[in-house]
Amino acid sequence: MPVFLIESIVLCLIFTLTVPIYGLHNLLAMIDSYPPAIQVRVQELGLIPAERPQKHIGAKLLFCLIAAVVLAVTLRIFNGADTFLSGFVTSFLLWLVVDWYDALVIDCLWFCHSKRCIIPGTEDMTQAYHDYGFHIQQSCIGIFIGLPVCLLTGGLTALLAVIWPPTVLL
């Protein structure tokens, strides 16, 4: 349990650090994380095109693949995971921790109440910025996105157990 707690804290810290790196320098880079009413206003202001290319899907798929590999290696080294089930369950629990942390802390507490996240021209949309339901809904979608990633993690964990015997572990 202490290993899981430490892993959860480290993952949440890493996730927290990615927010300013990814979006606070260019709020429009993370426009898909904003509630729909704000996205519509930003389109009306001409800050983003109405039809946006889905370039970020490839980056998200690459991130999911890297996350699965990193999780599998981490679970193999620090948790001693050596089966598909142990890799899947532990990685999914870690995914849930980060997903809920994102929804409750990053989105509902930080994003919804930070003046730094307000896009110029949408300052009057306080109610839309406080749309907690949107962030909880996105969190539920995130849980389903985590399933294939964690299934892959489970498979990689089992594979690592075959090619990376316990005597090699830390």
Image (spheres, grey):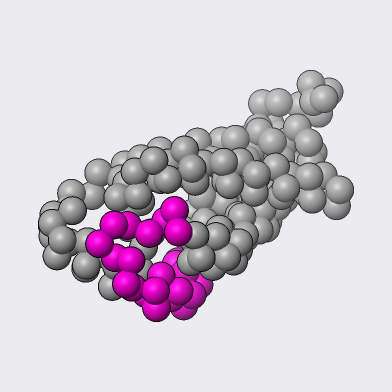
Residue 165 coordinates in the image, percent (x, y): 76, 26
The residue positioned 14% from the left and 65% from the top of the image is: 44
For the question of whether residue 140 can be seen, the reply is: no
Of 127 and 79, the residue lying toward us: 127
Q: Is residue 19 left or right of residue 77?
A: left
Is 152 included in the stretch rendered in magenta?
no
Is 118 included in the stretch rendered in magenta?
yes
The residue range painted magenta reads 115-144
Please identify the quarter of the rendering in which residue 164 is found. Answer: top right
Of 67 and 9, the residue lying toward us: 9
- Give the main secondary structure, helix, strand or loop, of the magenta stretch: helix
For the question of whether residue 3 can be seen, the reply is: yes
Residue 131 coordinates in the image, percent (x, y): 43, 75
Residue 85 coordinates in the image, percent (x, y): 68, 53
Tell which residue pokes out farthest to the right in this image.
Answer: 2
The residue positioned 57% from the left and 41% from the top of the image is: 17
**In the displayed structure, would residue 134 be above or below residue 85?**
below
